[in-house]
Image: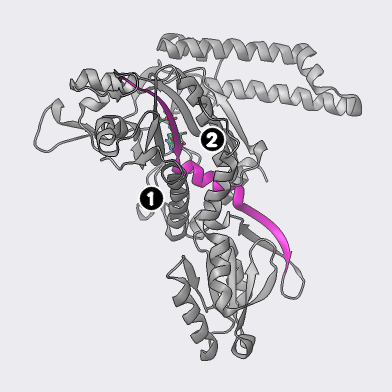
């Protein structure tokens, strides 16, 4: 499946099966804003729960908070977001389209990389078995030329972004003869900087002092509560504070479905450490978070680290965990060493001390911070992209039939188990099925359905990723057994009615993912 096709198919599937709808669709929607439907909200909740429990429940030294979205305006002055949370934008005068100037350069670099890959493919065909890819990459003059070009462009982009030298970024775009991807025009405006924060106004203060920002990251709610949490939980360094919540960014280019939105949800954890130990903790969290993604079932080859060259204004080291989305490797989570930047800034702007008293050293310490910050919507998209499968399977008569199935990890599935009476016209079957549903719904999210043929009902459950279907048939009346159908293997087995609950719970509880993750952490080297 091509990249575009596969994202289009996933987007269409999400709408058709109640996972994600375009926001305010009856008014033709609002760009880059989406609503989660009945199954989407459950899947999202399960991912959120898994993250929360992986942080707060599995770590004695991590606690959670839920801070308000609105914060005192000085928060954003202190955090640097008023002065430095900008993207460089550029308009095309002919197409009237607006772009992120740095992304246009990145796209140009991607094209050069594709040229390198084409050279490699050609050489592979030419030399067949004798082809030595590493040697070719290091010796081919053409590949070398493209690589040098990429390196020079990267360096210049990096310097321009670091120095906020928009003139040079503009000059680079002109020199590289970058054209508008839509119209092909090279008629560009100057590069300008654009603050990504949305603002609104308090009703009782008319001037600038009443300007409120919709938080662009949840992290600041954690920093301003540092002392409150410390006092009330009596944590000792190192310790973490976790939070899940909405964040808002006025993205210049918002696209690729829920990958880049203007309103999205973050799951962030700030880990406060003794100054001087931050790089060890940075390495630790890099590794721990990568293992978390692996436990979600993503193959190792679909995950990679990407070390940042262009650091955010608060970081002295940063790495992304990238997932191979249908449109290529892209960031799903950022791990940042934020130094003492935020606490120090809030101390200066608020006049309040945000220190930790170290009883062993008998001194007040301004902790350093390692942050793990993951997008809930991006994780949702990654989970869904990995689960989405089109395949051909035998139907009840053994005839090959196409099906679309979401092979979601069972604990994340919106519905854990569907209860289906074979026919709806026989009250003996529907009564047993209803009773089973009433029993199971106290423990887990299940679903009762009696309309349509059993084959159609199976297909509908496949399409929303339900791992187990329980069918109540005529044999149930005789011997109190039901069939349990496995979504991925299509295997059906008979089990006693009174064992259904334990069989389903054992396979679908979040605890199974959590213990898997916990096992994965056992050989993680301890930070001294
Ligand atoms: N507090 C640090 C911070 O916000 P970030 O790398 O800008 O760091 C963290 O964002 C994560 O938030 C990203 O890895 C991504 O998953 C998610 N994210 C950022 N912008 C987003 C957007 N416009 N739409 C959806 N998710 C986004």
x and y, in percent, of residue 438 in the image: 44, 77
Ligand 1: image quarter:
top left
Q: Categorize mark 1 by other alpha carbons within 10 Å: few (<14), some (14-19), many (20+).
A: some
Q: Is residue 71 magenta?
A: no
Where residue 474 sits, quadrant-wise, is bottom right
Q: Which residues are magenta?
A: 365-394
Any part of residue 92 in sight = no
Question: What residue is rendered at 84% in x and 22% in y?
Answer: 132
Where residue 305 sits, quadrant-wise, is top right
x and y, in percent, of residue 5 in the image: 62, 46
Q: Which numbered disc covers residue 288?
A: 2
Q: Is residue 15 left or right of residue 304?
A: left
Vertical relation: 183 (above or below) 323: above
Where residue 459 sits, quadrant-wise, is bottom right
According to the picture, the residue beneath numbered tag 1 turns out to be 23
Q: Secondary structure at mark 2?
A: helix
Of the pair 54 and 189, the residue shown nearer to us: 54
Of the pair 7 and 188, the residue shown nearer to us: 7
Q: Are marks 1 and 2 in contact (CB under 8 Å)?
A: no
């Amino acid at each position: 499946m091509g990249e575009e096709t596969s994202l289009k198919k996933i987007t269409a599937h999400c709408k058709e099966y109640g996972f994600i709808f375009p926001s305010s669709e009856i008014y033709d929607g609002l760009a880059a804003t989406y609503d989660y439907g009945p199954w989407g909200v459950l899947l999202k909740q399960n991912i959120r729960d898994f993250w929360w429990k992986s942080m707060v429940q599995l770590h004695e030294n991590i606690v959670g908070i839920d801070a308000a979205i609105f914060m005192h305006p000085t928060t954003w002055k202190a955090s640097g977001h008023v002065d430095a949370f900008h993207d460089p934008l550029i308009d095309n005068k002919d197409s009237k389209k607006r772009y992120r100037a740095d992304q246009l350069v990145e796209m140009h670099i991607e094209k050069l990389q594709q040229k390198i890959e084409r050279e490699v493919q050609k050489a592979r065909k030419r030399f067949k078995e004798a082809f030595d890819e590493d040697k070719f990459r290091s010796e081919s003059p053409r590949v070398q030329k493209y690589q040098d070009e990429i390196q020079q462009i990267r360096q210049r982009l990096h310097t321009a972004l670091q120095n906020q030298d928009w003139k040079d970024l503009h000059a680079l775009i002109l020199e590289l003869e970058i054209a508008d991807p839509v119209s092909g025009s090279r008629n560009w405006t100057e590069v300008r900087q654009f603050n990504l924060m949305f603002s609104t106004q308090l009703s009782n203060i008319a001037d600038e002092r009443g300007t409120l920002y919709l938080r662009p990251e949840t992290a600041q709610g954690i920093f301003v509560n540092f002392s409150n949490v410390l006092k009330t939980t009596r944590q000792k360094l190192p310790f973490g504070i976790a939070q899940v919540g909405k964040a808002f960014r006025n993205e210049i280019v918002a696209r690729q479905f829920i990958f880049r939105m203007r309103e999205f949800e973050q799951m962030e954890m700030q880990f406060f450490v003794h100054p001087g130990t931050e790089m060890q903790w940075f390495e630790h969290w890099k590794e721990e978070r990568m293992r978390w993604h692996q436990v979600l079932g993503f193959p190792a080859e679909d995950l990679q680290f990407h070390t940042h060259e262009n650091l955010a204004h608060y970081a002295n080291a940063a790495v992304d965990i990238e997932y191979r989305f249908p449109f290529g490797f892209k960031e799903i989570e950022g791990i940042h060493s934020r130094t003492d930047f935020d606490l120090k800034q809030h101390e200066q702007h608020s006049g309040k001390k945000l220190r930790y008293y170290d009883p062993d050293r008998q001194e007040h310490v301004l902790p350093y911070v390692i942050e793990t910050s993951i997008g809930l919507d991006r994780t949702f998209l990654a989970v869904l992209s990995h689960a989405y499968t089109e395949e051909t399977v035998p139907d009840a008569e053994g005839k090959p039939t196409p099906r679309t199935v979401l092979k979601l990890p069972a604990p994340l599935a919106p519905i854990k188990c569907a209860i289906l009476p074979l026919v709806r016209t026989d009250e003996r079957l529907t009564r047993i099925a209803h009773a089973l549903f009433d029993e199971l719904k106290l423990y887990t999210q299940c679903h009762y359905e009696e309309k349509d043929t059993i084959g159609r009902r199976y297909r509908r459950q496949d399409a929303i990723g339900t791992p187990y279907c329980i069918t109540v048939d005529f044999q149930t009346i005789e011997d109190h057994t039901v069939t349990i159908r496995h979504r991925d293997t299509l295997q059906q087995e008979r089990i006693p009615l009174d064992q259904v609950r334990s069989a389903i719970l054992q396979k679908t509880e979040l605890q199974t993912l959590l213990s898997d993750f916990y096992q994965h952490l056992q050989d993680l080297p301890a930070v001294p």
